[in-house]
Image (spheres, rainbow, N blue to C red):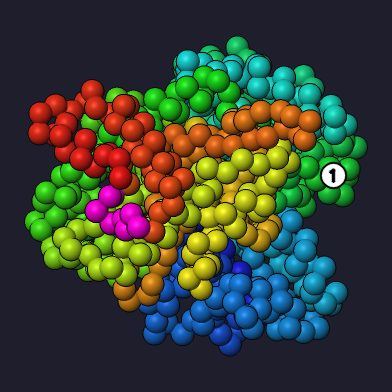
């Protein structure tokens, strides 16, 4: 920083595409801070260092940065400035802010520029981390493969036609797509460049008569090259997009400034008209077609079977298990399932007080035995050729307290209230979030995260633009109107630091309920199929309607899974899906 005359330098958790999970090459924030959570921004100044992260990671971050001279900035808490507010106050005349312009999205940088004093300089051309990271991993490499139309329901040409129709509406000559999931969805291609996200590093430019894919050509074998040629998709080197953009002039270019990086924006802003528009692929991707819906339901049956077998094994053997060995057993069940590709995220297997850390990940140092009595929270999921799953179950191991049952049943009531709702078309998740949060708020408790998120189809397990959240968080982009075909999780929870954590999570498909003179009504169909632990419920807390929902749900689970069980195993399934 001194050599380049910088007074502050931003190290985000990001790659060149604003992807949620990043490959090892981009884990600079973790390298420098010691904090390994999936979200956070490190700011280094000439006289200090500061880490911003959200409520999911307050406990984890505090522990991991202890003793490193870094101040934890708890996002959203009273008196805690945003990074923009902090920099506005910190940077004075002629001071310089630095960052790698490929790692921050254009929208963030433009907003930051507006807030800073006009005399503050910005240097976005230097990757300082690369200078000091001598053994930095290489950029990720994996071969690209095609996902058959049997799984996608639409060909690339069909999808391209829909995208071009949106470009025409927006009067755009060109569309730049940076988001990796959107490109993988558009081309019906997948790869393994990012852990638990089956995508590949690439950029796309779509013009009227030509689509250009910027990608490492070593990832494209002869079969994929033939497929791209047949569809008139030109390949160019991954990093060449910046030089190509500099030669484009007098065009109306559509792109999402929240997704494209600042260097892309800087390469074209002076010679072209920029149309800041959400990627057309985003909503098209979120509204699943009939084939994707059918495949997703079948996927959830297979995945639910894994979780149910895991539950039985856990109940009978937990005294001999640890957090890691239990997690490994569940992974083995998924790996042996037809069409398995990968886990959809690192499994959270958290016993007792570890469950209070929303995104706890067991290590050899933190791994504890599951012996004794307590609550065991397991949040997990899988990628399959036919779809992606995300499911959380909290299991009662041994004898649990009345307080635990009260809190567990409250979370269950929250899950049911959201799952049972009927609402007018036009509602967003923000309109509905209080249904889930209400029973927990009644206890004067809250959970520091959204209630649910969209789920991709063999893409990211966290997919915009649908979700449930009580207040709008622009960077999450999960406040879209809910539309039939969207799949969203329902996952309220209670987390008590030093005691335990409880979360129950199902995926729900948005469906049409009916049309009357009062409007068009929508609702949800729960498509996750695994028992909710009856051992942890206080039935006296449930209303007649809530019991009916739970009994109907468990009957559905039994109907989908009973053919895979026999003898004592079938009786066990019958017990844990019984009506109460």
Residue at far top of view: 230
Left or right: where does residue 57 sit relative to residue 369?
A: right
Q: Is residue 96 left or right of residue 31?
A: right
Q: Position of residue 225 (x, y in %)?
A: 53, 19
Q: Residue at x 43, y 27 (%)?
A: 297
Which residue is depicted at the point 43% across and 41% down? 549
Of 566 and 221, nearer the camera is: 566
> In the displayed structure, does residue 106 sit left or right of residue 133?
right
Q: Quadrant of the N terminus?
A: bottom right
Instruction: List x then y, in percent, for residue 373.
Output: 17, 65
Residue toward you, 139 or 17: 17
Q: Which quadrant of the structure image shows residue 65?
A: bottom left
Q: Is residue 566 magenta?
A: no
Q: Magenta segment, which residues?
A: 533-540
Q: Is residue 223 above or below residue 51?
A: above
**Residue that appears at 61% across and 40% down:** 422
Q: Quadrant of the C terminus?
A: top left
In this rendered view, identify the residue nearer to me: 108 or 129.
108
- Work out which residue is located at the far bottom of the displayed protein and give it: 47
The residue wearing badge 1 is 274
- Residue 360 appears in view: no
**x and y percent of residue 7 in the render?**
66, 80
The 10 Å Cα crowd at callout 1, few under 14, some 14 to 19, many 20 or more, is some
Compared to residue 129, the image places residue 72 above or below, namely below
Residue 365 in view of the camera: yes
- Above or below, 6 relative to 320: below
Q: Residue at x 33, y 50 (%)?
A: 393
Q: Secondary structure at mark 1?
A: strand
């Amino acid at each position: 920083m001194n050599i380049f005359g910088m007074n502050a330098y931003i190290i985000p958790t990001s790659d060149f595409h604003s992807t949620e999970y990043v490959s090892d090459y981009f884990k600079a924030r973790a390298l420098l801070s010691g904090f390994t959570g999936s979200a956070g921004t490190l700011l280094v100044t000439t006289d200090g260092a500061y880490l911003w992260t959200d409520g999911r990671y307050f406990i984890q971050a505090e522990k991991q940065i202890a003793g490193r001279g870094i101040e934890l900035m708890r996002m959203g808490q009273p008196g805690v400035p945003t990074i923009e507010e902090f920099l506005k106050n910190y940077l004075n005349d002629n001071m310089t802010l630095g960052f790698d312009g490929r790692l921050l999205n254009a929208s963030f940088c433009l907003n930051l520029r507006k807030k800073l004093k006009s005399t503050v300089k910005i240097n976005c051309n230097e990757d300082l981390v690369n200078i000091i990271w001598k053994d930095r991993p290489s950029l990720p490499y994996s071969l690209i493969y095609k996902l058959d139309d049997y799984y996608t329901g639409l060909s690339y040409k069909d999808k391209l036609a829909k995208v071009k129709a949106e470009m025409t509406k927006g009067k755009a000559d060109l569309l730049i797509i940076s988001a990796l999931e959107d490109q993988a969805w558009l081309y019906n291609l997948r790869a393994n460049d990012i852990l638990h996200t089956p995508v590949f590093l690439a950029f796309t430019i779509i013009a009227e008569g030509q689509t250009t894919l910027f990608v490492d050509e070593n990832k494209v074998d002869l079969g994929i090259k033939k497929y791209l040629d047949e569809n008139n998709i030109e390949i160019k080197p991954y990093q060449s997009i910046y030089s190509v953009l500099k030669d484009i002039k007098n065009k109306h270019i559509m792109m999402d400034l929240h997704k494209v990086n600042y260097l892309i924006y800087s390469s074209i802003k002076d010679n072209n008209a920029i149309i800041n528009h959400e990627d057309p692929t985003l909503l098209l991707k979120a509204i699943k077609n009939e084939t994707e819906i059918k495949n997703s339901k079948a996927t959830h049956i297979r995945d639910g079977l894994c979780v149910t077998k895991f539950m039985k094994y856990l109940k009978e053997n937990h005294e001999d298990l640890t957090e890691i060995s239990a997690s490994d057993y569940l992974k083995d069940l998924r790996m042996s399932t037809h069409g398995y590709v990968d886990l959809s995220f690192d499994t959270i297997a958290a016993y007792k007080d570890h469950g209070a850390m929303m995104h706890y990940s067991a290590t050899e140092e933190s791994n504890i035995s599951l012996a004794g009595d307590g609550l065991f929270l397991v949040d997990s999921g899988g990628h399959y050729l036919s779809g992606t799953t995300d499911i959380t179950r909290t299991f009662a191991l041994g004898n649990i307290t009345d307080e635990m049952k009260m809190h567990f049943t409250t979370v269950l009531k929250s899950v049911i209230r959201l799952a049972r709702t009927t609402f007018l078309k036009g509602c967003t998740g923000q309109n509905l979030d209080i249904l889930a949060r209400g029973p927990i708020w009644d206890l004067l408790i809250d959970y520091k995260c959204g209630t649910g998120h969209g789920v991709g189809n063999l893409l990211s397990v966290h997919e915009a633009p649908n979700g449930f959240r009580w207040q709008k968080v622009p960077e999450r982009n999960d406040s879209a109107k809910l539309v039939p075909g969207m799949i969203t999780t329902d996952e309220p929870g209670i987390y008590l630091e030093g005691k335990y954590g409880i979360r129950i999570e199902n995926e729900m498909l948005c469906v049409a309920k009916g049309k009357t003179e009062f409007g068009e009504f929508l609702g949800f169909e729960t498509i996750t199929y695994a028992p909710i632990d009856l051992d942890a419920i206080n039935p006296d807390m449930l209303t007649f309607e809530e019991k009916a929902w739970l009994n109907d749900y468990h009957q559905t689970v039994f109907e989908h899974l009973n053919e895979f069980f026999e003898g004592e195993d079938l009786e066990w399934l019958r017990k844990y899906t019984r009506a109460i």
